[in-house]
Image (cartoon, rainbow, N blue to C red):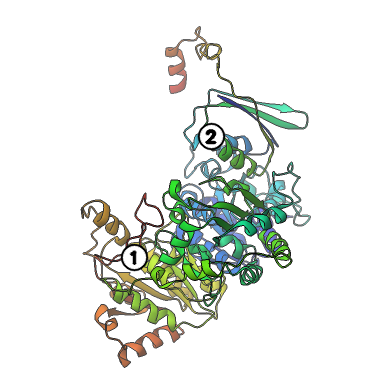
């Protein structure tokens, strides 16, 4: 697993372009978080990638018009999935209720 | 006070646009209502895909952005193939779509599609305009990104209510991009590159479209004249190197020349100028230029290392990096590469004598191309005729050979030729299609008939989807599944139905050593006519394109003719 931090101007579609560089390669995206950072935005992604894909992703991201900076963190060997295995929607709502809401 | 639609057109004029291609519909009607008197000429195609390919043709012929207009929903989705095509081939293209009114967006309204979302991964930049006030700034930014760096497609989606709304117009905007952080680049590449060249025993140069897009062909020619190393071009690089250059080996890749492919296989230093190293150029990536170090001149960093890591990336505008390199080359000393150049041009690397079922078709193209004026443009569709045309192309013209190379979009040629002819009204425009591709946008015959565009159309009719059939023959045990077009319509009759002078020629006329006076005369009259013309050439159904590097093979493993 590898962590990437991308700083970008939060213009229309920029975050989606960043994410589509991941989805077009069929990569799983177990964690993503976007947040404001000073006058710009930052998105953090966790990906299982090969070294070749790291290079491709860097270049694809840097080619996005409003991406300002791309950095990679140290590889993570023991990613703790448990924190992300809590039910969604919250267990108190229940799947039946969620399905009804979606159909409405 | 001006309507949003009037503001759009004024901003287009400010960007230098006087010609657009499109197809009207509900959500874009205000823009069409404002066209009259705007100074923008609109070309009505008969399908939105025709409009976007025509805009591409105009852009490829001029270097200026082409503009395509469509309505929401199906109008917008019909643009998508052309947008993807422009992205792959670095064509500056501005697409304008109408959208349902802003209050209805997201409600699955009639003819609503999320064209912004659909084209995110196909465009360089796009925007759903959110107010009438945004229009001038959005148009300025769209044109900036379409033209800057590696050119490409952009899209502007205008909700219909903003096109109808009014505001005080204070003039067009000028877009100034905010700086990105510094790109990783080799700022002192010249010294490293000179050292690599001095160590190289078998250097070669591979030239792609980037050289032409940068306007750097003269610089490149001077560089190659100085270095005297073997050089070859991709299909989009054709015309960038003068054909008569003693070091020019022709087209490289799947259907390239033996000399070019063998030199690329054997090289120990590959200089790439503005090419993506597409898989049609490299063959099996694992066995591509196996002994070579790669130096890659490229404006778009995202194109580097796609196939193999390069030893030296030279990122930047080739109009600046090639002269900088040339300047250093002129002051450096290199070993002689004469022996290597002689080897690449030697007889055992020359093409075998042409024979086989495709020979009359190649001869036909030779005779046709030979009769074209120097400043003519050839546009091809996609398939066997495209590769035969590329192999037979012999002009020294930067924008003289136009084709859908990256995406390989059948149906491209006819509408693209409309755009080229409008861009170059006094020049000869030759559109070469196959029988399959021609039928994909055959409706554009009506466009060129209405405009009386003197486009010369050629259909190479083998009554098959020929390239797919060739692969079925070679790799699928002749299982010609769903490629048979033997029930093709009478193309001559179709041309005549559009009031276009049409006729057919046959293979037998191109077998004798000398053409008959009658055939010669018919070719000359066809090309010289001030009106549109359609020539149907009946080609052998099983004629194949050779040489060929089979899928998964190395460039050195070419196949020649039917054996």
In the displayed structure, B544 sits above or below B141; it is: below
Image position, residue B122 (x, y; %) = 53, 47
Q: Chain of mark 2?
A: A
Image position, residue B438 (x, y; %) = 36, 65
Q: Which residue is mark 2?
A: A22
* Crowdedness near tag 1: few (<14), some (14–19) or many (≥20) residues, C-alpha within 10 Å: many
* Quadrant occupied by the C terminus of chain B: bottom left
* Crowdedness near tag 2: few (<14), some (14–19) or many (≥20) residues, C-alpha within 10 Å: many
Marks 1/2: CA distance?
38 Å
Q: Is B359 left, or right, of B344 in this rendering?
A: left
Cβ atoms under marks 1 and 2 closer than 8 Å: no
When asked about the image quadrant of residue B309, the answer is top right
Q: Residue B546: which numbered mark, if any?
A: 1
The answer to whether residue B23 is seen in the rendering is: no
Q: Nearer the viewer, residue B340 or B388?
A: B340
The answer to whether residue B536 is seen in the rendering is: yes
In the displayed structure, B290 sits above or below B389; it is: above
């Amino acid at each position: 697993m590898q962590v990437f931090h991308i700083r970008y101007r939060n213009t229309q579609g920029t975050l989606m372009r960043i994410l589509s560089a991941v989805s077009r390669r069929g990569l799983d995206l177990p964690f993503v978080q976007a947040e404001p950072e000073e006058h710009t935005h930052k998105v953090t992604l966790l990906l299982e990638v090969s070294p070749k894909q790291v290079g491709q992703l860097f270049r694809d991201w840097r080619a996005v018009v409003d991406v300002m900076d791309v950095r990679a963190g140290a590889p993570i060997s023991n990613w703790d999935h448990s924190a992300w295995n809590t039910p969604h929607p919250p267990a108190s709502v229940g799947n039946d209720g969620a399905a009804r809401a979606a159909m409405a | 006070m001006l309507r949003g639609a009037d503001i759009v057109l004024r901003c287009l004029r400010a960007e230098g646009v006087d010609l657009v291609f499109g197809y009207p519909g509900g959500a874009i009607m205000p823009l069409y209502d404002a066209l009259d008197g705007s100074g923008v000429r609109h070309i009505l195609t008969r399908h939105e895909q025709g409009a976007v390919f025509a805009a591409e043709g105009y852009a490829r012929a001029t270097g200026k952005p082409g503009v395509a207009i469509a309505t929401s929903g199906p109008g917008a989705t019909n643009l998508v193939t052309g947008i993807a095509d422009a992205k792959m081939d670095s064509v500056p293209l501005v697409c304008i779509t109408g959208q349902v009114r802003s209050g209805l967006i997201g409600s699955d309204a009639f003819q609503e599609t999320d064209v912004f979302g659909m084209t995110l991964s196909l465009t360089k930049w796009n925007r759903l305009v959110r107010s009438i006030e945004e229009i001038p700034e959005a148009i300025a930014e769209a044109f900036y990104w379409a033209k800057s760096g590696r050119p490409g497609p952009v899209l502007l989606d205008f909700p219909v209510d903003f096109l109808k709304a009014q505001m005080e117009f204070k003039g067009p905007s000028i877009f100034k991009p905010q700086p990105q952080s510094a790109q990783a680049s080799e700022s002192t590449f010249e010294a490293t590159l000179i050292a690599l060249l001095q160590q190289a025993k078998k250097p070669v140069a591979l030239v792609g479209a980037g050289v032409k897009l940068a306007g750097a062909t003269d610089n490149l020619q001077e560089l190659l004249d100085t270095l005297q190393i073997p050089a070859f071009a991709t299909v989009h690089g054709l015309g960038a190197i003068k054909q008569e250059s003693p070091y020019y080996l022709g087209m490289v890749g799947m259907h390239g020349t033996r000399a070019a492919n063998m030199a690329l296989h054997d090289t120990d230093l590959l200089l790439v100028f503005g090419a993506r190293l597409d898989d049609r150029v490299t063959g099996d990536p694992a066995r591509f230029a196996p002994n070579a170090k790669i130096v890659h001149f490229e404006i778009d960093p995202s194109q580097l290392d796609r196939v193999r890591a390069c030893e030296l990336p030279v990122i930047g505008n080739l109009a600046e990096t090639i002269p900088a390199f040339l300047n250093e080359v002129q002051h450096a000393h290199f070993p002689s590469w004469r022996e290597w150049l002689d080897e690449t041009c030697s007889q055992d690397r020359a093409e075998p004598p042409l024979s086989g079922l495709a020979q009359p078709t190649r001869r036909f193209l030779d005779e046709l191309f030979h009769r074209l004026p120097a400043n003519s443009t050839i546009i091809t569709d996609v398939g066997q005729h495209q590769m035969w045309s590329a192999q037979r192309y012999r002009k020294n013209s930067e924008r003289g050979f136009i084709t859908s190379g990256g995406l390989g979009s059948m149906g491209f040629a006819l509408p693209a030729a409309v755009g080229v002819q409008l861009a170059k009204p006094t020049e000869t425009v030759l559109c070469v299609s196959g029988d399959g591709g021609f039928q994909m946008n055959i409706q554009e015959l009506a466009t060129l008939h209405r405009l009386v565009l003197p486009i010369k159309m050629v259909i190479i009719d083998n009554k098959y989807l020929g390239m797919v059939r060739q692969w079925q023959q070679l790799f699928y045990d002749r299982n010609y599944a769903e490629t048979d077009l033997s029930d093709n319509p009478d193309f001559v009759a179709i041309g005549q139905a559009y009031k276009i002078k049409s006729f057919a020629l046959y293979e037998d006329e191109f077998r004798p050593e000398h053409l008959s006076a009658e055939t010669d005369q018919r070719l000359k009259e066809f090309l010289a006519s001030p009106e549109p013309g359609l020539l149907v050439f009946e080609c052998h159904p099983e004629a194949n394109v050779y040489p060929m590097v089979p899928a998964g093979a190395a460039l050195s493993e070419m196949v020649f003719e039917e054996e």
